Every structure is written in structure tokens, then in C-alpha cells.
Image (cartoon, helix red, strand yellow):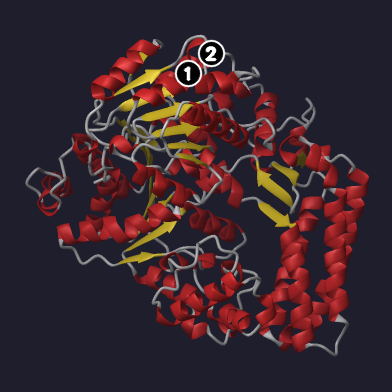
Amino acid sequence: MLLQELSDIFAADGPIAKAMPDYRPRQAQLELAQAIEETLRDHSTLIAEAGTGTGKTWAYLVPAFLSGSKVLVSTGTRTLQDQLFRRDLPRLRKALALPISVALLKGRGNYVCPYHLERLSGDDRALKSRAEISQLRHIQIFAQQSKTGDKSDLAQVPEDADIWNRVTSTRENCLGQECPHVRDCFVLKARRQAQEADLVVVNHALFMADLALREEGITDLLPTVELVVFDEAHQLPDIATRFLGSSVSSHQLLDLARTAEAAGLAYARESTNWSEVGKKIEHAARELRLTAAPIDKLPGRKATFQAIPNAAEFDAALSALLDVLDTSSALLGIVSEKHPDLAAVSKTCLDIRAKLYQWSQPDRQGNNALKPTKENAPSADNDASAAVRWVEHSLHHMRLHSAPLSVAQIFSRYRGKDQAWVLTSATLSVHGDFGHFLRQLGLWDARTETWSSPFDYAGQGVLYVPKNMPLPSERNFNEKFVGTLLPLIRVSSGGVLVLCTTLRAVDRIAELLQEHFEDEDIDRVLLRQGESSRGALLERFRASKNAVLVGSASFWEGIDVPGDALTLVAIDKLPFAPPDDPVLEARLNLCRNQGGNPFMEYQVPEAAIALKQGAGRLIRSERDWGVLMVADMRIVEKPYGKLLWRGLPPFARTREPEQILAFIKRKQVPQDLCNTDASDG
């Protein structure tokens, strides 16, 4: 019955088509919706790779609406979360005329905390500049007028402004039911709405935070649901690794020192010398950071637990810090009941102390996996408990990290027996093989399906791998890359996105392009990652129509620029993860230790999925066209290269520059004919 209903809804004369003039029926969209309905009915797991333009958003929302079940949709980013909640859900709800209640739920750091806002408002010394004084006024007015308290709704204060850290709460400093403003708490209001709604929109970070809390026995974050949909599911392994690990930074320790002193002086002045307590924490934290200074000279400014240059000195400083935290925690524990602020700082001190102690314990977290021997080789069954620890150091901070080498067992056991899971993205497989993704998340019983994009990639785009390029490791690679790219920029009137694998390459390639633009009088806006926020750069890129944007990791995905505003995507090198990543190093060692081939089993699949993400920026609608240039010759000259280019959309291919220039000239049309709506509907 429902299958027929789905066919009617997605038909050319159905309710969606009537409500949305730009809608076009797609067979793949209907089939994906039917597969999701079957998954929900069977309480099973579906991993669905749906190519760009399939319309996966409607495909999972329609059966979710019709099911009558409580549904959780998790998105890759807060931006996509807001788009889904504010644009897609209202449009579909109106089209189907269904009384579905929906709620938006984010992490607590996204909501103004009335208590912390009041504290900051009463502390003139806490404001660092005139800009912050103005920002505080905006936040104060916003908190009085807003129904949600969601900082993304306040345009006057940037979402990454430092002041937000002082007017929002954390799990450690939240006063809970003891808070004098508990009735006005935006976090509690959002969670109540989520408990009552039919469909709740969250993001992967919040979902993983909930998973991590459930591992600790805390279950009050997300509501219980019958269906979970993970959109942009390819991000899940990395986000799970981050949230199932832990970290402590020097910033956190210095903040603890300040808040312990402030709360003690304010509410328990007579019990001890709180200024001395704060100074001791601060001194111990700075001493630890000082002993970590040699790490600054190592690749990536990182060192694994076993590779810390001055290990004995570092261990002594860490032990001294733990002693100070023990003493501070005992003092705070004695007075914690005197005031909620004292209780909150006591809780924070205990939490940081526990994380640092666990980090300091040799081999408790399976770190022998980093230096495997035949005797300690972990098996596929026991690698779930293995973790890697490392220290990150820079000019302004130090951070101690821990991350699990595998999230498979934790993630896979999180699904309830009566729960259905749908994981969807355009990039989950390597040329149709889902093995890498399944292995990372432990979802071996999942049904896997692929629906190809409806776009005519062979007619709309060309993959260009230039001849006579040096290897990426050679010194003149960036110069040759820019020299090869320039003729395409000269002849193309549309926007250009240059995707680099490192921030160093971003800076060098942008410098070279700037020099050529000035020497050859090329009138193009040149944008580079780091000169302003990602959102601001993308806004300028879209508005300019023919700008050149040079970016790294965060620009390889989540960018939707249809039409002539983007007609050329140029990738400098194959996106193999950097060798200085401690988690990657440990996972490769673990794979090698188990008799596997880490390059083919881990590095190549990761690079293939990342490359497919980057390539996916080019064609976003049926009327788009463009060139994908990959300047790394290994994609055609190395045996593994075939796996990489076969995983890309089926573009026409050439290595001849003349053919590329002719293609661009043939496709070039006035920009006003290329305006399209690239909605996912």
C-alpha cells in the first residue's frame, strides 16, 4: 500500500510536483524511498550511496513522514542541519499537507545560557575589547527576544566569536536543576521540543556526543526513535573517532585556574587562599606546556605518547600537574555545596583530572599497537579497545589527545533492536565496494545499494590529467601545476575552485596565481582559505561569478555552486592523508600487524572517497558543465590509480590540453542562461 503511495507522491502529477515547479520525477529517487520504507518496516540497516542529483533528501523525508514513526535525521554540518529544518522540511510538509511536528536540536554550545550571560554582564573586566562590549549588548537583547537562543539566529555576532564561549554552557559547568534560570534554559526547551516532536534534526557531532555519553551511562540527550537517517554519512567514521576520544588543552587548564580562583573568592573566601590555588594550577599547566616545546619542531607539531622528545621531563611535569589538580579538587569538594559556581568548577576539575590521569597511564589504552611486535599483535577481536595518544603543540596552545583506533564495536552496538538506520551519501563506496565503510563502522549486516546520478557526466564534463607533470614530491610541482592551470583560467569565463591537500600548498599556489594575475593583467578575484571565514569566502565566490578560490580540506565537500559560478575544479595532488597524523599512523600499523596491506586497505580507499568528494563540487545540476583537472599523474600511471579514477563520475577523459581548451570554448555560454536551481529535491 505504502509503495503505491510513494509512487503517487513522486509522480509527475503528484503533490510534490504540484507544490514545487522545479521538481522532476527521478526513478532513482523513488527506488531509494522504497528501499528506505522497507528498511523501516524490517528494522534493518541500509547503506545507500546516491549520486548527486538523485534527490536523496526527499527520498528519505517522504517515507519518514508517512511512517508515523518518530524519526531522527542527523546531518554532517550545522549549516545543512539549518537548511533541512528551515527550507526542506517546511516545503515538504506543506506539499504533503501532513501535520508533522519537527524540532531542531544542537549541542549546548550553540545556545545562549541565561546564567552565564548574567555572570558575564556583571563582570566588566571579562570583556576583552570594544567589539566584545557591542557583541554582549546584541546577545543580551537577543536572549530577551529569541524563542530558541540559537546563536546562528544572531547575525550581528559571528558564530566563531570568542564571546560565545563565555555566554554558553558546557556539560561540566552547567548547573542543571540548581540553576536559578532553569525555567529560561534554551537547552532544556530545545530538548523538550525534541522529545515531543515527530521528527528531530540533529548533526553528527551531537549524535556522537550522545553515543559517548551513553557509554558513560548517561541517556538524557537524544530522544528514543524508530528511524535514524544519517545524511552525509561518509563523515561518520572521523566524527566518531573524535567524539569517542578525549582531549585536554592548556586553554582548559588556564580557564580552570581562573574560574577556581574567581568562584572561591566570591563564595568561599574564608576557607582557603583561592588566588594561590589558581596560581598553582596555572603554573603547573605552563610548566607542562614548556616541557612540550620541543614537539613544535616535529612534523605536524605532534608527537605520539612513545615519541615525546623529553619523555622523563614531560612525565614529571604531568605528574606534578595531577598532584596540583588532586589538591585543588579536594579543596573545591569541601566547599562545592556552598554555591552552584563552586559545584560546577569542582566538577570541571574532576573531569580534567580524570582525563589526564587516564591519558598518563602506560598501555592502558592499547598504545602498544603503535609499536607492534609478533608477541603483542592485536587481533581483529581485541583492536576495539586499542587507542592512540599524542601531544599537539603550537605557539599558543598545547593539547593532549586520545582517540580509539576502531569505533566499529561501539558504533554498531548503539542501534536498538527495533530501530532502523539509513546511512546515505554520494561517496560511501570505492568503485561500488562498500567494504572500507562497513569495516570502519562495523555494520556488516547492512544492506548496501547504489543509485547513480541522473546527470550526463560524459556530456557535461571532462576529466583532464595533464601530461609531463612532475611527481608531487618534486620541488617544482606547484610552479608546474599553476603553469598548467593558467591556460584554462585564461580561456574560462566561469569560477575556478583549486583544491589542495595541504595548507602550505594553498598559500604557495595562491601566491603563484597572484603573481601571474598581476604580470599578465588577469582580472580575477583571487580568494584563499584563511583570509576570512569559510562562509564569507563562499559567499564572495558565488557572487563574483568568475573568482578563483584556493582551499584545502574543508573546501573538498559541502560546497554547492551551480551554473557558471564554478566551471573548473583543479586538484593538485591525490588526497592521501598526511603521514604525521597519529591516528592514521596507528591504524596503518595495526593493519600491517594483522597481516594486511595498509596502503591498499586503508589509504587508497580513504583517498578515493575524498577525491570523489572533491570531484563532486563540479556538476551540481542537469545544466552544469565543467572541467575536472587532476594534476597528479599517479592517477593514471600507478596501478592503484585505476581504483581512484574509476570511482569518479564517468566524465569524458583526456590528457591533451588542446582538447580541454576546445571543450571550454564550445561550452561557454552567457551566464544568464546558466542560472539553475540545484536543490536536492
Q: How many marks?
A: 2
Near-viewer residue (631 or 198): 631
Distance in Å between CA atoms under marks 2 and 1: 9 Å
Residue at figure coordinates x 60%, y 37% from the top left: 503
Q: Are marks 2 and 1 in contact (CB under 8 Å)?
A: yes
- Neighbours of disc 2 within 10 Å: few (<14), some (14-19), many (20+): some
Q: Which residue is mark 2?
A: 469
Check disc 2 and give the amino acid type.
Met
Q: Residue 558: horizontal and vertical position, in percent?
A: 42, 43
Q: 121 or 311: which is nearer to us?
A: 121
Mark 1 closeness class: few <14, some 14–19, many ≥20 residues within 10 Å: some
Name above or below for residue 597 compared with residue 188: above
> Which of these two is toward me, 110 or 544?
544
Residue picked out by circle 1: 484
Please, is residue 89 above or below residue 196 in the view?
Answer: above
Percent of width and height locating residue 89: 27, 58
Residue 178 visible in this rendered orientation of the protein: yes
Residue in view at x 25 percent, y 26 percent: 668
Residue 156 quadrant: bottom left
Residue 67 point in image, percent of width and height: 25, 56
The kind of residue tagged 1 is: Thr
